[in-house]
Amino acid sequence: MFEKFFDRIWRVNAIRNGPSGPLLVGFAEKLYQKGYAEITARKHIRAAEHLIYWTDGENMPLSSLTEEFSKRFDRHLCQCRCQGFGHSNRLELVNGARLFLKHLRSTGVITAPIVEPTTQDPNLLISFRQWMHQQRGTSDATLSNYSHPIRSLLRRLGEDPVTFDAQGLRQFVLEKSQKCGWAAAKTCTTALRMFLRFLIAEGKCATDLEAAIPVLAHWRLSSLPQYLQPEEIERIISSCKPNSMIGRRNRAILLLLARMALRAGDIVQLRLSDIDWKEAEIQVSGKGGRQTRLPLTQEVGDALVAYLQNGRPPTETDRLFVRSRAPFHAFSSHSAVSVMVSQAMRRAGVTCLSRGAAHVLRHSAATAMLRQGASLQEIANILRHLSIETTQIYAKVDIAALRQIAQPWPGV
């Protein structure tokens, strides 16, 4: 296996015949299976050698190592004098050591128990998340956002809901809203409202406390959706190189966003089994876990076929889209999709109109459908809005229709 990464036979023999040769052989095989590039794999193997050399000097058996030793190894690198080992890039060495420790634990070499973090969420918060999962089907990502303000509330008011009062809740929201933007403050009030509903349902606090959470000032439909012109969308899609693996992947993602108005979160959640090639449909898991089947156009279908045949690396995950660099696993969050879209916009010379680059493509698709004569109800179905009132904001960008109902200015 070392021959895959090293050209010099003496280097291969030195590693294989060393005291930890079998361990490093298994590690190299794992790196190869995960698709690591040759130069990256060599760095990780060298880091593993360095870690073994250091543990031998410290008289620490490998079987007793824990994840905490990667931190100790990092501190060692700051003053390392190990003969024959360089440490020009400490971050790469620590990362390689962590991967090696993870491999040793997965193969049973490390037998030391995993040390659980000493900090744990309050029981109330744990019960709340379980209740939201069971009663409302709330996603982990949403509950993670809700957990931040609830933790702060419990630290402020204590973990006994009987002591909660309207004044303390309102003061907490006021202080929070002064330190963040409207969107973060809205998430805070929504999280607290849901938390109080849970407490009320469980009989843990007064039934009228939910009304103590103030409503933040916000005028519905007061803003305009940010969108791009059709020629800008085409430039963005064309910026992806069709002959490269990453270009095929990015083009397929951009088409799903720009033609089918998917959210960045939808892209992350797509699985191979969600595509029905026979019926030319794609199943999308939206907010709240709602499943929707959308028609798959020829253009989008062709882009997906090109990606699956010549762009998607071998991987164990069933997620449709995966990282372009090893280890080849699914995107960690919707932010990775927005970053990719932002990069495509820069290549195309298109200015991103808002922080959520991927969502701009969704707005652009809805605006294009409206200008092509689609009704608000049809657009709401494609966007998977539960209420058509959410879709009404796009009526404000239909300039041709607005001219027909515009009244002349008084006195003109």
Image: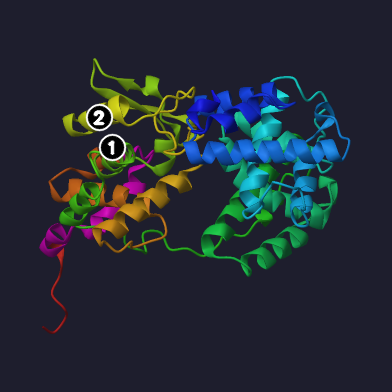
**In contact (CB < 8 Å): disc 2 and disc 1:** yes
- Amino acid type, callout 1: Arg
Amino acid type, residue under disc 2 in the picture: Ala
The secondary structure making up most of the magenta span is helix
Place of residue 379 in the rendered image (x, y in percent of width and height, measured from the top left) = 25, 42
Q: Residue 202 vs residue 263: left or right?
A: right
Please state which of residues 5 and 332 is positioned toward the viewer in this rendering: 5
Q: Which residues are magenta?
A: 383-404
Residue 325 location (% of width, % of height): 45, 39
Q: Tell me where residue 349 sits by quadrant.
A: bottom left
For the N terminus, the image quarter is: top right
Q: Residues within 10 Å of mark 2 (few under 14, many from 20)?
A: some
Q: Is residue 363 left or right of residue 152?
A: left
Residue that extends furthest to the top in the rendered view of this protein: 278
The residue tagged 2 is 306
State the image quarter where residue 345 is shown.
bottom left
Quarter of the figure with the C terminus: bottom left
Q: Which mark is residue 403?
A: none
Q: Is residue 367 left or right of residue 321?
A: left
Q: Is residue 101 magenta?
A: no
> Residue 399: x percent and y percent?
16, 61
Q: CA distance from mark 2 to mark 1?
A: 7 Å
Q: Is residue 396 magenta?
A: yes
Residue 204 appearing in the image: no
Could you say which is closer to the camera, residue 354 or residue 225?
354
